Each structure stands twice: as structure tokens, then as C-alpha cells.
Amino acid sequence: MLFSDPPAAAVRSASRRAEEDYLRVLMTRYQSGEPSAVDELVRALSPMLSRFFASQYLSLADIEDLLQNCWLRIHRARHTYRADEPLLPWIFAIARHSKLDAYRKRRRIGSREVLMDQLPERSAEPPRESPLLGLLERLPDSQREVLVMLKVIGMSLEEVARATSSTTGAVKQKAHRAYAALRRMLEEVR
């Protein structure tokens, strides 16, 4: 009984290390110009990046645009990746900057747009939204971003700290404040 199956956390940790090692190998192959490595890397990381961009409650088209822009930036910056460093923080730092730049661009465009006198009528019922998604939307962007990286994408505290150019303590603080705010909002809903 003492030497039964390893704890689930240890198995997940070993699995994440193996996945990270595999992604590092793909990235170094990508840096050396191997076409199949690019395809594998895009297939492996695009779902995580899409979930990260989806945390901003954008349209599917905007998420796809962000994803494409992010991959262009990764391609241009691929020579800066060092194989001895973890890959996910490097990738998500680029994704975060892509998201921030897109936000700034939308703000600039929005400030120059002219409002219409009358809005067109909606043709379909709005999609039903999970109450939790509505609560997440009310969190500050920095807290929501940290929660998505930690809980949706599954990054470690250290990886999130690197991706957001902050300390592990700051990431913990943002996550703690986000959890507390979500608890308060849930109590209000009840």
C-alpha cells in the first residue's frame, strides 16, 4: 500500500516536463529550418494560444487574426529562442504582446469610428453564456490573463511569471485576488 501508484500531481508534472521537452525539440528543429517541425509546433501550440486569446471574449475571426499574427511574430523572433530556456513562457510572452498590440489597435480604430444613428436589428438569439464566463469577464484583464494561463492552459507559476514579465509572487497575488473576487461575485449571484 505504501508503494502504490504515484500521486496524480507527480504524474501530471512528469507529463508536462515530457511535453515541454518535446516542444523544445520541435522549436530547435524549427529554428534549423525543418518544415515538418513548424507544422507539428503549430498543431501542438495553436489550441493553447487560441484559448488564451479567447479569454478576451473576442469573435472567432478576431481570435484567428490574433493567432495568425502571433505565429508571424514567433516566426520572426524564432532566432531569439534559446533551447536551454522553457518554451511556453517565451511563446506566451509573444502572445501577450500580440494581444496587447491588437487591443491598442482596436482602441485607436474605435476612437476614429463614427457612430451610426440606428443599429441594425439582430437576426438570431444571442448565444447562451455560462454564468462563470460572465464573472470572469468582470475581472481585471491582468487577473483574468493569469487565471487563463494557470487554469485553462495549465502553465506553472514560474512560466506565467516569465510570460507576463513579472515575479512568481506577483502572479500568486493576482491569482489570489482573482479567486477572492470570483468568490465574492459567486456569493452575490447566490
Image (spheres, rainbow, N blue to C red):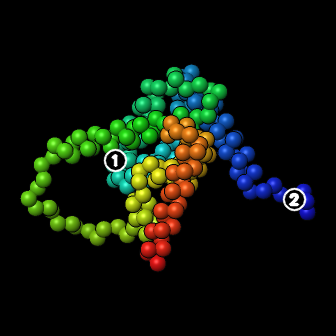
Judge the density around disc 2: few (<14), some (14-19), many (≥20) Cα neighbours within 10 Å.
few
Q: Residue at x 8, y 59 (%)?
A: 117
Question: Which residue type carries mark 1?
Answer: Asp
Which residue does the numbered mark 1 point to in the structure image?
62
Residue 109 percent location from the top left of the image: 21, 42
Report helix, strand or loop for mark 1: helix
Query: Which is more toward the observer, 125 or 166?
Result: 166
Residue 176 numbered tag: none
At 46% from the left and 31% from the top, the residue drawn is 74
Say which residue label 2 marks.
Answer: 4
Residue 87 sits in which quadrant?
A: top right
Picture coordinates of residue 124 (x, y %)? 26, 68
Give how far across and how far down residue 29 sits, in percent. 59, 26
Residue 60 drawn at (x, y percent)? 36, 52
- Residue 189 in sight: yes
Quarter of the image holding residue 105? Answer: top left
At 48% across and 73% down in the image, what residue appears?
Answer: 187
How many numbered discs, if any?
2
Front residue (pair 18, 186): 186
How many residues crowd mark 1 within 10 Å: few (<14), some (14–19), many (20+)? some
